[in-house]
Image: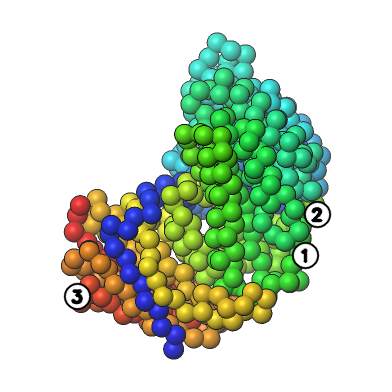
Amino acid sequence: MAKAKVLFDKNFIIGEIDKRLSGSFVEHLGNCLYGGIYDPSHPESDAHGFREDVKSLIKELGVTAIRYPGGNFVSGYNWKDGIGPKEERPHRREMAWKTIETNQVGINEFAAYLKGMDIELIEAVNLGTGTPMEAGELVDYCNGGGNTYWSDLRKKHGVQEPHGIELWCLGNEMDGEWQINMLTAKEYARKAKEAAKIIKWMDSKAKLIACGTCTNEVGHTSFGEWDRIVLEEAYDYIDYISLHRYFNYRPGKQLAYPMHDDISDIPFFFRDLQDYLDTIISVCDFIKGKNRKNKTIHISFDEWGVVTQDGAVPGGQDDGHGYAQFELLDAVIYGGLLCTFLNNVDRIKIACQSLLVNAGGMISAVPGRKAIRQAVFYPFRDVARLARGVSLRPVAELPEIETNHHGAQKSIAVAAAHDGKHGKLHVFIMNCDLREDCELTLTFGSFGRLKGLSHSILYNDDIHLANNFQNDSAVSPQTIGLKSPENGTITVLIQKHSWNVLSFETDHQ
């Protein structure tokens, strides 16, 4: 049996946990939106065509923010097609995913949908085929108080109060060869800067997210250098830089760049993610220091996920009305990625899982059927619900296992959230070792007396077990009791390929 030791001290604080860390992503792709979230023909749809069963699961997940409407889709999207009377909206050829966009859901419908669930909208503007002025007009339409053409048009369309959208993405993956109207770093930097100026003239409260390197995969040659060039030009005008990453251990499922990782390489994913973050944060800080800036650029990791066998491929056609079937092992990987985000909350302020429904979705909701939770639903829900207050820095001795392509890598990921206001401490633990359980000894430093509350475990002997419409609870967590630490120390068994949450009661502070 493997062994691990971890120390958490309430004074070893990484930073405040931003609620936007529990974000997700909705794109006009496949049946993520149409046929998933929005389906007027479904018996559980409301008067506006949105499925109530899907809405219920989104609320259960604890999603705090949703990035919309893309994604690759946004680089060819004219937002003006999605406003006004639905019967007058045009059908357009959609180039990113090779479908027909009906424009039955636009900014007003989706903003109202999220407002009804108290979820923040993160809106992306088209900087592919779109112009900086069109981006500014969208901001005025959404956030203007009146007495301008665009804000008065919104009122004419039945939305009297401004949407009040704060966060705006300046395009999507503009360094990707698959992107509609891909740009060079210099071209994008100038366009993003001019769009940022216009947006902030339209709404001085707007916060802007610039496109960073859209992946660190081998073969993506703009990695790092793109970020430097964009930041040199636009540093004063933006607040965040975005990163995207989809991890894949299925060699038969190729995306934009050839990959050879297999199931043995999963422990490397979390090191790779940390290296990615370290590189881009270093670029941000280099430009800050070089140009003697006072403000710090933070990270919006606004697309992340695990590749499934049936997901969409950039530059190709989406999978129609299918849904992503996640296995238990995918949920374990989700847990490790979430731990990595929690251990970097000093710089990651926004993170959006991709996608929310169906294609890569934590929720499956194909037409004519009930909505179900996929295996990855549970680790996301745990972090979204429980990660409050501050993230604590682990001091750890963790076991390593050999991978086929990346040498020895740590098999355990761990993070902790301390909510002093409510007297709660939650420890999140992922074990991606496929063969060995781990005996984990936790020491809690200066916490004093802790009361053990519960140990939630997501585990099954079969790593390929998945939820489907015939059995929607094959993968689901079990909760057992948790003894209280003695002299600040507790030892727990962490099963192989499992996701765990240990919950404790602390003194209120």
Residue matched to label 3:
487
The residue tagged 1 is 258
Report how far apart the C-alphas of labels 3 and 1 lie in the structure.
51 Å
Horizontal and vertical percent for residue 376?
53, 64
Q: Quadrant of the N terminus?
A: bottom left
Q: Quadrant of residue 194?
A: top right
**Above or below: residue 372 compared with residue 72:** below
Q: Nearer the viewer, mark 2 or mark 3?
A: 3
Task: Residue 486: name its quadrant.
Answer: bottom left
**Residue 501: image location, x then y, percent:** 38, 68
Toward the viewer: 279 or 104? 279
Q: What is the spatial separation of the Cα atoms under label 2 and label 3, in whole angstroms?
A: 58 Å
* Any part of residue 213 in sight: yes
Relative to 293, say whether 151 is above or below. Answer: above
Can residue 51 be seen in this snapshot? Answer: no
The amino acid pointed to by label 3 is: Asn
Q: Residue at x 59, y 70 (%)?
A: 268
Task: Tell me the element at label 2.
Answer: loop
Name the residue type under label 1. Pro
Contact (CB < 8 A) between labels 1 and 2? no
Q: Residues within 10 Å of mark 2 (few under 14, many from 20)?
A: few
Kindly identify which residue carries mark 2: 316
